[in-house]
Amino acid sequence: MWGLFSNKQQSKVHRFLYFVDDKVKNLLEWTKYFKHKHDEHDRRLSDIEQKITLLPTETDMRQLIDMHYLNHDVRHRLNHLHSRINTMSTIHQHVPDRLKAIHEKIRKIETKHSLLADSQERMAKMQEELAKKPVQNVIVQETPQIPNTIKSHFREKLVTNLAKNSKNYVKNSIVSMIKKYGSLYGAKIKEMIVEDQKLCSKSSLYRILSEIEAEYNVNVSRQGKDKIYSFESAIIQQNI
C-alpha cells in the first residue's frame, strides 16, 4: 500500500496520522476530565439535595416559634410562683415571734378586762349594800344618791370607751402587721384577726380596713377579688 506513495507523501501521511492520534488522545483526556467533573457535580448536587431535605419546613418553623413562646410563658409563670413562695416563706418565718407578741398583748388585755370586771363587781356590791341600808341612815350620813340617768350615761360612756379602745387596738395591730411584712392580702388579715385571734367580727374588720384606707397612707391594689394592703416606705420590723 505504501508503495503507491512517494517518500515525501508517506512522510506527510505519517505526520498527519501522528497529529490525529495526538488530537484523539487529547480529546480522550478532556473527555475523562469532563466525566470526572460531571461525577463530582453529581455528588455535590446530591449532598445539597440531602441538606435541603433536612431544612425545617414552614410548619416546623411555626411550631418552633410557638414552642419558644410557650417555654417563655412557662418560665415566667415559674418565676412568679417562686416569687410568691419566697414571699410566703418570709411571712411564715416571723409567724412564731408575731404570735408570741400577740399572745402577750392578749394576756395584758385579759388582765385589764379582769380588773375591770372586778371593779364592776365591787360597784355592784356597793350598790346592793346601799340599797339594803335604811333610808334614815342614808339621810343622816348624807350619802348622795346617783340618778338612774347618770348611771346609764356612765355605763354607756364606759362601754363606748371600751369599744373605741378595742377598735384602735385592732386597727394599730393591722397597721403594724402591714408595716412588718411590707404587704398583706385582705384574706390573710381576716384569717389572722378574725379567725386566729378572734379580735373582732368580719363585718367590723371590713369597717376598720376602710378606716385604715382613709386615715393612713396605705396603698391598696387588687388581685382578683382580694385586696393587697402595703406601704410605700414600709420597713420590715423584727417585732411588732
Image (spheres, grey):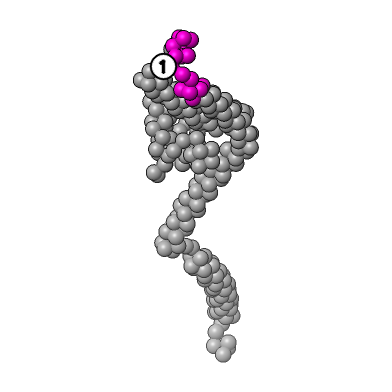
Residue closest to the eye, 237 or 21: 237
| Residue at figure coordinates x 53%, y 47% from the top left | 81
* 129 versus 220 height, above or below: above
User: Which stretch is magenta?
Assistant: 126-143
Queried whether the magenta region covers residue 240, the answer comes back as: no
Residue 87 found in image quarter = top right
Residue 15 image offset from top left, x and y in percent: 57, 75
Q: Determine which residue is flagged by label 1.
A: 146
Identify which residue is drawn at 46% across, 19% down. 134
Where residue 198 appears, as percent x and y from the top left, is 51, 38
Q: Main secondary structure of the magenta part?
A: helix
Q: Amino acid under label 1?
A: Ile
Mark 1 residue crowding within 10 angstroms, few (<14) / some (14–19) / many (20+):
few
Q: Residue furthest bottom?
A: 1
Q: Position of residue 143 (x, y in %)?
A: 46, 12
Judging depth in this view, the residue of 99 and 185 nearest the camera is 99
User: Which residue is at a point 53% across and 31% down the rendered structure image?
Assistant: 177
Q: Quadrant of residue 157?
A: top left
Please check the rendered image and state whether residue 128 is part of the magenta-colored stretch, yes or no: yes
Image quadrant where residue 213 sits: top left
Disc tally is: 1
Q: Position of residue 165 (x, y in %)?
A: 47, 24
Residue 120 in view (yes/no): no
Q: Quadrant of the C terminus?
A: top right
Depth order, front residue of 75/69: 75
Q: Quadrant of the N terminus?
A: bottom right
Q: Secondary structure at mark 1?
A: loop
- Relative to 85, is 151 on the left or the right? left
**Residue beneath the point at 48% across and 23% down:** 132
Q: Left or right: 225 with respect to 19?
A: left
Q: Eyeballing the image, is 150 above or below 13?
A: above
For the view shown, which residue lies furthest in the left direction?
149
